[in-house]
Amino acid sequence: MATVEEIIEKARSLSPAERRKLIEALDRDLEQVEEQDRDKPAIETDREREAERARADLLRRAEAQGHNAVNFTGRFRRGPDSDS
């Protein structure tokens, strides 16, 4: 199989009409890849995962101590020290 550099060198030797065909084909392929990427869930970074773990741990500790805490949907949960 040819390397990317070899493919690029070969593309440079194409006629203008052949280059247009190649560009159009690559554009179509790129559009398909971009559509597939949009359909995939975003990959969390280590920093995002760590922040979510810390947030969940903080909520667990607050609830264990009887404090009100906000759940992940943003609604308040009633703790044991609530009036209602």
Image (cartoon, helix red, strand yellow):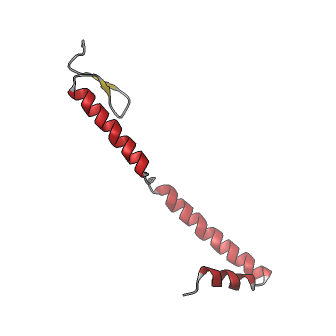
What x and y, as percent, mark residue 16? 79, 80
Q: In which quarter of the image is residue 53?
A: top left
Q: Quadrant of residue 25?
A: bottom right
Q: Residue at x 74, y 82 (%)?
A: 12
What x and y, as percent, mark residue 55? 35, 36
User: What quarter of the picture does the N terminus occupy?
Assistant: bottom right
Q: In front here: 32 or 43?
A: 43
Please give left or right for residue 83 compared with residue 48 in the image.
left
Q: Quadrant of residue 17?
A: bottom right
Q: In front here: 71 or 37?
A: 71
Q: Residue at x 59, y 70 (%)?
A: 29
User: What quarter of the picture does the C terminus occupy?
Assistant: top left
Q: Which residue lies furthest to the right in this view?
A: 16
Please give left or right for residue 70 compared with residue 37 in the image.
left
What x and y, as percent, mark residue 21? 71, 77
Please give left or right for residue 38 compared with residue 27 in the image.
left
User: Number of numbered discs present?
Assistant: 0
What x and y, as percent, mark residue 67? 26, 22
